[in-house]
Amino acid sequence: MREATSVFEALRAKGEEFFGAVSAELMSNPRFMKAVETAWKGKAKLDEAVAQALKSANIPTRTEFKSALRRIDALDARVKELETAAAKPTRPRAGRAKASRAARGE
């Protein structure tokens, strides 16, 4: 079993070495880097266009949707706090009971 593991480890090490060499070569190629930069700019423009299309269709973006969910969660937590506070039994204060009886003429 150890032999299979060492073969796998050797293959993985060779793969990592090869990947590292190819990556370094690509990163040193100005044309490749220009293509990557252009792709990122294109993605940014596409993202903006999609967001604008969603806005035009009155559909919330992912960011707006997540923001709304956070707000709903905060409101839900506040409602639970208020329900808990309202459910606690309150004892009438002695001063209030005397004042009520005095007002009724007792």
Image (spheres, rainbow, N blue to C red):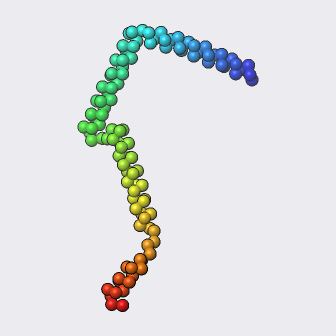
85 or 66, nearer to the observer: 85
49 on left or right of 16: left
Q: Residue furthest bottom?
A: 106
Residue at image position (40%, 50%) is 73
Q: Residue at x 35, y 39 (%)?
A: 63
Q: Residue 49: percent from the left, percent from the top?
A: 28, 30
Please tell me which residue is depicted at 30% across the width and 25% down the height of the picture.
Answer: 45
> Which residue is more in the foreground, 56 or 44?
44
Quarter of image, res 106 = bottom left
The image position of residue 50, as x and y in percent, is 31, 32
What residue sits 36% from the left and 43% below the top? Answer: 67
Residue 104 vs residue 64, the one in the foreground: 104
Q: Quadrant of residue 17?
A: top right
x%, y% of residue 64? 33, 41
> Which quadrant of the figure has residue 31?
top left
The answer to whether residue 102 is above or below residue 92 is: below
Q: Farthest residue in the left direction?
A: 56
Q: With respect to residue 95, does 34 lie above or below?
A: above
How many numbered marks appear? 0
Q: Nearer the viewer, residue 88 or 30?
A: 88
Q: Is residue 37 above or below residue 53?
A: above
Q: Quadrant of the N terminus?
A: top right
Image-based side of 97 in relation to 9, left or right: left
Horizontally, is 10 left or right of 65 in the view? right
Left or right, 10 with respect to 50, comes to: right
